[in-house]
Image (cartoon, rainbow, N blue to C red):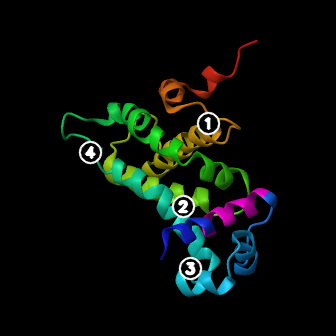
C-alpha cells in the first residue's frame, strides 16, 4: 500500500466529514471522488470497506498513545497511581496534540459515530489492568473505571475540539489542575 495514496484516502474521508458534518457513512465512490482517484484503487490496493478506513484511523491515532500508555506500569521504576496524571500530561497530551486535526473531526462530526466508544473500551481495559482505584466512596469498580475514563476523555475532548487547541506545554498544566477539580469547584458560587 503506497503511503501517499493511503494518506490521500484518509484525508479525503476527513474533508468529506468537514463538508458533511452530520453524515456518518461515506461510500467508496464519494471518498474516491474527493481523493481524485479511482474507486477501484481504494478497494483493490488499500481498504476493503469504508469501515476499514475508520479502523485504520483508530489504529493510526491510538497505536503510539497505547504503546506509550504501556510504558506506565504502577509500582515499577518508582511510578504509582499518583503519578498517572503527571504521566498523561507529559507523555500523552503531546501525542494527542500531534493528531489534533483528525481528532477535531472525529469529535465534532458524525463521520465516526463509534470513536468515543472505541476510546472508552480501550482505556477502561487499560485502567482495569493497570490502575488501583480508590474504594473510599463505596462505588463499584466498574462504575469508578467508567467515571475515570469519561472524565479524562471529556477533558481531552473539550481541549482538542477547540478551534485552536492550546499547545501541550500550556494545556498540560491545565490538565493537571482539571484532574484535581471536582464539579463543585468548577461551578461558581453565587
Q: Disc 3 on helix, strand or loop?
A: loop
Q: Residue at x 48, y 61 (%)?
A: 60
Cα separation, mark 4 vs mark 2, equals: 22 Å
Q: Residue at x 61, y 75 (%)?
A: 51
Residue placed under numbered mark 3 in the picture = 47
Q: Residue furthest left?
A: 77
Residue placed under numbered mark 4 in the picture = 73
Residue 107, compared with residue 38, is above or below; it is above
Where residue 180 appears, as percent x and y from the top left, is 49, 25
Cα separation, mark 4 vs mark 3, equals: 35 Å
Segment tinted magenta in the rendering? 9-18
Q: Residues within 10 Å of mark 3 (few under 14, many from 20)?
A: many
Q: Main secondary structure of the magenta part?
A: helix
Q: Earlier in the sequence, mark 4 or mark 3?
A: 3
Q: Residues within 10 Å of mark 2 (few under 14, many from 20)?
A: few
Q: Disc 1 on helix, strand or loop?
A: helix
Residue placed under numbered mark 1 in the picture = 159
The answer to which of 141 and 129 lies nearer the viewer is 129
Where residue 146 appears, as percent x and y from the top left, is 51, 49
The answer to which of 164 and 180 lies nearer the viewer is 164
Residue 95, compared with residue 2, is above or below; it is above
Q: Are marks 3 and 2 in contact (CB under 8 Å)?
A: no
The answer to which of 188 and 162 lies nearer the viewer is 162
Q: Are marks 2 and 1 in contact (CB under 8 Å)?
A: no
Q: Residues within 10 Å of mark 1 (few under 14, many from 20)?
A: many
Residue placed under numbered mark 2 in the picture = 118
Amino acid at each position: 500500500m503506497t503511503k501517499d495514496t493511503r494518506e490521500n484516502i484518509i484525508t479525503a474521508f476527513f474533508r468529506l466529514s468537514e463538508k458533511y458534518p452530520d453524515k456518518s457513512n461515506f461510500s467508496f465512490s464519494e471518498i474516491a471522488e474527493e481523493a481524485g482517484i479511482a474507486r477501484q484503487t481504494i478497494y483493490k490496493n488499500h481498504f476493503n470497506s469504508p469501515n476499514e478506513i475508520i479502523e485504520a484511523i483508530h489504529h493510526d491515532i491510538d497505536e503510539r498513545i497505547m504503546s506509550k500508555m504501556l510504558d506506565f506500569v504502577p509500582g515499577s521504576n518508582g511510578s504509582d497511581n499518583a503519578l498517572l496524571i503527571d504521566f498523561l500530561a507529559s507523555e500523552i497530551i503531546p501525542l494527542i496534540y500531534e493528531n489534533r486535526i483528525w481528532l477535531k473531526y472525529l469529535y465534532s462530526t458524525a463521520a465516526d459515530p463509534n470513536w468515543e466508544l472505541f476510546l472508552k473500551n480501550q482505556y477502561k481495559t487499560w485502567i482495569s489492568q493497570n490502575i488501583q482505584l480508590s474504594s473510599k466512596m463505596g462505588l463499584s469498580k466498574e462504575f469508578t473505571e467508567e467515571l475515570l475514563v469519561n472524565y479524562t476523555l471529556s477533558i481531552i475532548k473539550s481541549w482538542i475540539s477547540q478551534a485552536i487547541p492550546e499547545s501541550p506545554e500550556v494545556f498540560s498544566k491545565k490538565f493537571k489542575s482539571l484532574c484535581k477539580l471536582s464539579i463543585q469547584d468548577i461551578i461558581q458560587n453565587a
